[in-house]
Image (spheres, grey):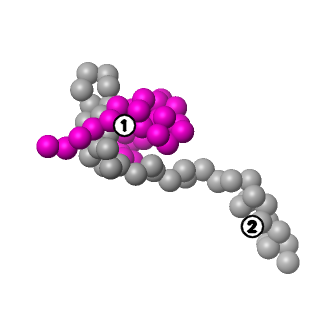
């Protein structure tokens, strides 16, 4: 039997809000999740999804190399 943690527990573990965890679950970015009622359950061994947003340092580094 698989063991689970709630979105709130995952948020504390990964230092994210439970709302962000729910967003990741709903968008399919965390495999093996289950929703019962309005509570998301994640496998205990689930990995934190990578943040797909750009960081300002990366954007600045890319623009510096474009200028030559």
Looking at the picture, does residue 65 appear above or below residue 20? below
Label annotation for residue 26: 1
In the image, what residue occupies the spot 36% across and 37% down? 26
Residue 10 visible in rendering: yes
Q: Position of residue 43 (x, y in %)?
A: 29, 43
* Secondary element at image label 2: helix
Q: Quadrant of residue 62?
A: bottom right
Label annotation for residue 62: 2
Q: Position of residue 17 (x, y in %)?
A: 52, 32
Question: Any magenta on residue 68?
Answer: no
Q: Position of residue 53 (x, y in %)?
A: 60, 50
Outermost residue toward the right?
68
Quadrant occupied by the C terminus: bottom right
In the image, what residue occupies the spot 54% across and 50% down? 51
Is residue 38 or residue 14 the one in the foreground?
A: 14
Looking at the picture, does residue 65 appear above or below residue 19? below
Looking at the picture, does residue 7 appear above or below residue 62? above
């Amino acid at each position: 039997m698989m063991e689970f943690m709630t979105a709130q527990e995952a948020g504390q573990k990964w230092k994210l809000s439970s709302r962000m965890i729910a967003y990741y679950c709903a968008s399919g970015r965390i495999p093996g999740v289950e929703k019962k009622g309005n509570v998301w359950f994640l496998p205990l061994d689930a990995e934190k999804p990578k943040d797909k947003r750009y960081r300002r340092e990366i954007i600045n580094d890319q623009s510096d190399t474009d200028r030559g």
